[in-house]
Amino acid sequence: MTAQMSLLLACFVAAIWLIALPLGRWLAVIASGCPPLFAGAERTLLSLCGVRGEEQGWRAYAGALLLFNALGIIVLFALLRLQHLLPLNPQGFSALAPDLALNTAVSFVTNTNWQAYGGESTMSHLSQMLGLAVQNFLSAATGIAVAFALMRSFARSGAAGIGNFWVDLLRTTLYLLLPLSLIIALFFVSQGVIQNFSPDLTVKLLEPQLLADGGVRGSQTLAMGPVASQEAIKMLGTNGGGFMNANSAHPFENPSAWTNVAQMLAIFALPAGLCMAFGHLVGDRRQGWALLAAMTLLFVAAVGVIASQEQGGNPHFAALGVDQAAGALQSGGNMEGKEARFGIAASALFAAITTAASCGAVNTMHASLMPLSGGVALLLMQLGEVVFGGVGSGLYGMLMFAVLAVFVAGLMTGRTPEYLGKKITPPEMKRVSIALLVTPLLVLLGTAVAAGSEAGRAGLLNPGAAGFSEMLYAYSSAANNNGSAFAGLSANTPFYNLTLALAMLLGRFAVIVPVLSLAGALAARVRARRDEAGLQSAALPTHGPVFVLLLVLTVVLVGALTYLPSLALGPLVEHLNLSAALRSPQ
Amino acid sequence: MTTPASSRAVRTPLFDPLLVRGAVRDALVKLNPAAQWRNPVMFTVWLCAALISVLWVQALTGNGEAPAWFIGANALWLWFTVLFANFAEALAEGRSKAQAASLRSLQQRGSAKKLRAPRHDAPRDSVDMMALRVGDVVLIEAGDLVPCDGEVIQGAASVDESAITGESAPVIREAGGDFSSVTGGTRVLSDWLVVRCTVNPGDSFLDRMIAMVEGARRRRTPNEVALALLLVSLTLVFLMATATLLPFSIFAVQAGGQGSPVTVTALVALLVCLIPTTIGGLLSAIGVAGMSRMLGANVIATSGRAVEAAGDVDVLLLDKTGTITLGNRQAAAFLPAPGVSEQALADAAQLASLADETPEGRSIVVLAKQKFALRERQLLSHDASFVPFTAQTRMSGVNWAGRQIRKGAAEAVRRHVESLGGRYAEDVAQQVEDVARRGSTPLVVADGAQVLGVVELKDIVKGGMRERFAELRRMGIRTVMITGDNPMTAAAIAAEAGVDDVLAEATPEAKLALIRRYQAEGRMVAMTGDGTNDAPALAQADVAVAMNSGTQAAKEAGNMVDLDSNPTKLIEVVEIGKQMLMTRGALTTFSLSNDVAKYFAILPAAFATTCPQLSALDLMHLNSAQSAILSAVMFNALIIVALIPLALRGVRYRPLGTSALLRRNGLIYGLGGLLLPFAGIKLIDIALGALNLV
């Protein structure tokens, strides 16, 4: 890694930890009740919606959540199918095909934001604002609500309820996502992110472009729209669905170095803040620090690999004598698919952040990453999006691993395992196992079906190992609700639209339901108090470096053991091919 | 306390030839898929072995996917994997059965003297022991076997319970009180007892113990179930990871245009190596061995759940008397009356105690000897007559050489002295009060009508208890002393013994309330008890060890019975419980860490033709692809056998504190489990190569 890269990474991590402190406190306030200032307004709003806000058991909570999200899919699907009839469609885009509309609806409701379409050439302004941006808020709020429910269940003792979904949804949206998005959007606008309802602009090129057929192109079409308002929540809610096809590589979405930093910070802010909030809620802030430390360790290691691989450059170019060294005039390294204005450091960091968190926004094309970097990006998603992860889903995913780590380690110390004073018994293990099983099954089965079917192979751009990586990446991204894509896969086919929609749907809700069920089981359990002075606790401490290391190893071991064969066949073979090609010059 | 019988189980060698022979036979019997179904991990291996066997037959006919010898060898070792796991379980069960058999041999058939009325002198019939029913009353005389578990309703007798407890000293059983229960299979040595049977034959305490040990009623414990769930999930994940490799490799062959898809044999080998066969194969053996270890410590647990709960105990309630302090008080000081020398008092007290065989009496003799070198005198040659203790006089003593020496409770001695016209000094009364306030017991000594002084009898904390409690504290277990003493006395003894807390003036209700309070805080409570009034508390406690010498009610309420009736045993019980959990955890970690090396062995081998680049993963530089796969499979099977001793003996427990324990076991079984298979697989590969087998 270059000095610039190290400095950037260090500053970024420090900034995230600093942001997490106040944010965590605020999240804890929202999770435990209504902020006093808003009590009157909230009561009025809730009664208008006919919500009494009583405590719900996990079944009622999950029922409300599923109902709400099902409605979200239906409304968004209808909106996309009818967009040609609706206003704010200056380009006159036609309705989306049913399979694409379904895929997109599921994608945005599940916080995945997998995009099988190009935004500026498919979506009307209304679809972007009323459909996609709204779901950006609601899917993020849904994730946070689940995290709240699980956090509360650890804090409670012998309780029947885990909270109220409608109340959580309202508070998260109103007191957290909306105000923060507003501030971030205003900052984006100040930096040059566009925000308008104009039709596409045609501008005269300063320097006409000579075309291959001898013709001359004198003008260019620029897509317009309400970008800034959507951009803020796209990052903050780890959604990642870009207004433009080029996503955050597009200058109208991400115009400057400052917006780039702001975007990266916005992605990690809530996942990090939720760790802190967890500490507040369970009454021991060290518990939150431990989770954040484990996430940070995994993240820094991933950035290390990606940055050094990208900075190392492409050996094929090196063989041709191309200068790939970093210098004053160039950032060097593998610049394929990257924006020159971001260079290696900001691109590599962004790639790690967007795959670690289940954001999926990109400022660099992941298919053009070096094979091992792509492998790390894949692995970050395949770990289950727990390295910061999605808003809410990152925390509850990591807590599943924490329970698993505590289970095996607790047994090793000769006690029935216990996390935060809650015994881990068969009912808990059953739910944790299901939650951890879902995504590997979806990823592996999905990739196998695609690799084994004509329809699946038809979408591949690259042959061989790279093609395999494209499929593996698509299903890893969808099932883990990341949404980033390895460019190269033509995903807008009925086969991919439908199978990926299924993967996204199950990857989201087949995890959420067992997690909520776990919350119900945990809330009902008596929480053992162990804060007595003078008596060393017999339960495994879950706040020290030993536990952090244990958690990291558990995540890596489970992920590696599950995906090593498929990663070997994709990125690893590609990497070995690359070095082999150089050893035997043709 | 010595527990000769406790060595009974431990001394059985781990691989006793007789047991091994039986276990080998049982291992083959257990190949029946109906028996495998209970263990999903091993059932998966069974299916894999069957599948590979079919492929082998196909290869023999000439159209196999790989050489027949290779598929055959794989099939053979997969069957071995199943057999080794079966063997581990069968061996653990065999050892338990051997223990059960030695208990069963106690059950001798014979006749019993059944009484027609619950009186000693009622007419009696001779009936077969097995014909007795609940409520029947029997007479048991010196030399008779006790025919059933029961309650003494008349009489008192010394009973030899060594058959069950291994304790050779006979114990007294008598009607009423806490020593009124007798156990079938023990023998009355003197006097007689009238006993009412409390259980039917075949349903006696011993029978239930045996039934349980024989595994007939072994149910999986909560932790075992939770772990099994995890193992099933892992098996599913690995099934997916390996099964999907087939389409992946077909794709790779099509895309790369070289090689042939991975063989089913290689995939199945990979699957079996990855799924947690080590812990899966040994899981049930660990459970059986845990119960068996309890039995080795002469504790009968009524369920595996109880054994497991013992490992989780947070709070130990310990009775003061007999557990923390020696059962009997001991003389600690001679406090002479005014005008009497301490030596004169000691001399008189010793004389009065020479014939007193109670521990208190012995302790007075010993103290006098220590303090003033007063030798025990042989009084029998003189015309000494001993005055035994009676409930009426509440004194004992000796008449010797014209002296009438008495010792006894203050009030009794005062009456005695005053009846002889002597004066009971105020100072003595004051001393008596002081001693009582210190929590000790005063004994007043008188010579004729003259009061000589007071002997202080003190509670003596057992040797080593302080260290044990410190050890328990390091284990994170809180100790609470239960005593009927007043709070001041209790606090003094608690401080001396080093317990964390004390419940003074304890009533059965107070005990029960204390247990409930701890449980409401989410703590697991363990206690021992023997009396009927302990029963409610025993029933409430999570781990309740009843003394075998205790009443039937106490034994029914508890979930463990200590045959040695040793209250300190609770600590051992906790350690055995912890050992069982640790063994499971350690082997699970080991099993998972092993997978890393197996991937490095099998992946490059399985894709040798499709993706030859992956040979970069072949860190061990194994002989050939076939040797690599076979070595990994063989390692996977052999490690089960290698770990059988660990599964049966259990990972050694050290009271280190949770974090230290985790670091230690994590290093040994985690890191060790990561590295060992690299060496193991390489060694097997070298051996196969050296023998020219591959």
Image (tube, rainbow, N blue to C red):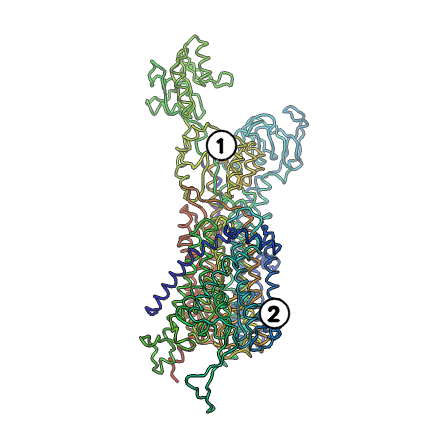
Whether residue B22 is visible here, answered yes or no, is no
Q: Secondary structure at mark 2?
A: helix
Q: Is residue B631 above or below residue B558?
A: below
The percent position of residue B152, horizontal first and vertical second, equals 59, 29
The quadrant of the image that shows the N terminus of chain B is top left
> Pointer 2: residues within 10 angstroms few (<14), some, or many (20+)?
many
- Relative to B19, B347 lies left or right: left
Q: Residue at x 57, y 35 (%)?
A: B536
Tag 2: amino acid: Phe
Q: Is residue A108 left or right of residue A272?
A: right
Hey, which quadrant is residue A49 in on the image?
A: bottom right
Asked if residue B285 is positioned above or below residue A196 in the image, the reply reads: above
Q: How far separated are the C-alphas under marks 1 and 2?
A: 86 Å
Is residue B670 toward the left or the right of residue B83 in the image? left
Number of numbered discs overlaid on the protein picture = 2
Q: Nearer the viewer, residue B387 or A490?
A: A490
Q: Are marks 1 and 2 on the same chain?
A: no
Q: Residue furthest bottom?
A: A214
Residue A20 appears in view: yes
**Which of A243 and B596 lies nearest the eye of the viewer?**
A243
What is the number of the mark on residue B666?
none
The x and y percentages for residue A230 are: 50, 68
Parent chain of label 1: B
Q: Position of residue B631 (x, y in %)?
A: 46, 67
Q: Position of residue B143 (x, y in %)?
A: 57, 30
Residue carrying label 1: B169
Viewer-proximal residue, A586 or A34? A34
In the image, farthest residue toward the top: B421
Circle 2 residue: A77
Of tags 1 and 2, the one toward the viewer is 2
Q: Amino acid at mark 1?
A: Ala
